[in-house]
Image: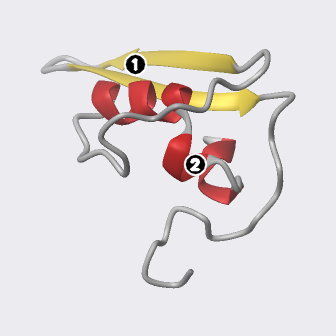
Amino acid sequence: MCICINCNHITKCNTYHLIESQHKQPHLTRSPLFIPKYPVVHVNISNNCTYNQIDWDLVECLSFVEKPNSWNLDAN
């Protein structure tokens, strides 16, 4: 699971912006300026008979600052 959803920097983070792109999701920010320190992204590839699935998860980051539910802009 991506830790970004509970990080205070999610709306301005360029690594999360990349993950949004890989998941073909709309971006929270058009031009993120925050560059996190030492993010670790796991790319999980699974396949079955009909298609391949790729999942990108940021699992470690020295810049992580916990703020639960940060991805939910309506709740902030």
Q: Amino acid at mark 1?
A: Ser
Q: How many marks?
A: 2
**Mark closest to the chain's N terminus, 1 or 2:** 2
Q: Nearer the viewer, residue 61 or 13?
A: 13
Dot 1 lies on which element?
A: strand
Q: Amino acid at mark 2?
A: Ile
User: Quadrant of the image for the N terminus?
Assistant: top right
> Residue at left 42%, top 33%?
17
Depicted 27 relative to depicted 34: above or below: below
> Residue at left 80%, top 41%?
64
The x, y position of residue 40, in whole percent, is 71, 17
Depicted 51 relative to depicted 57: above or below: above
* Residue denoted by label 1: 46
> Residue at left 83%, top 50%?
65
Q: Quadrant of residue 46?
A: top left
* Residue denoted by label 2: 10
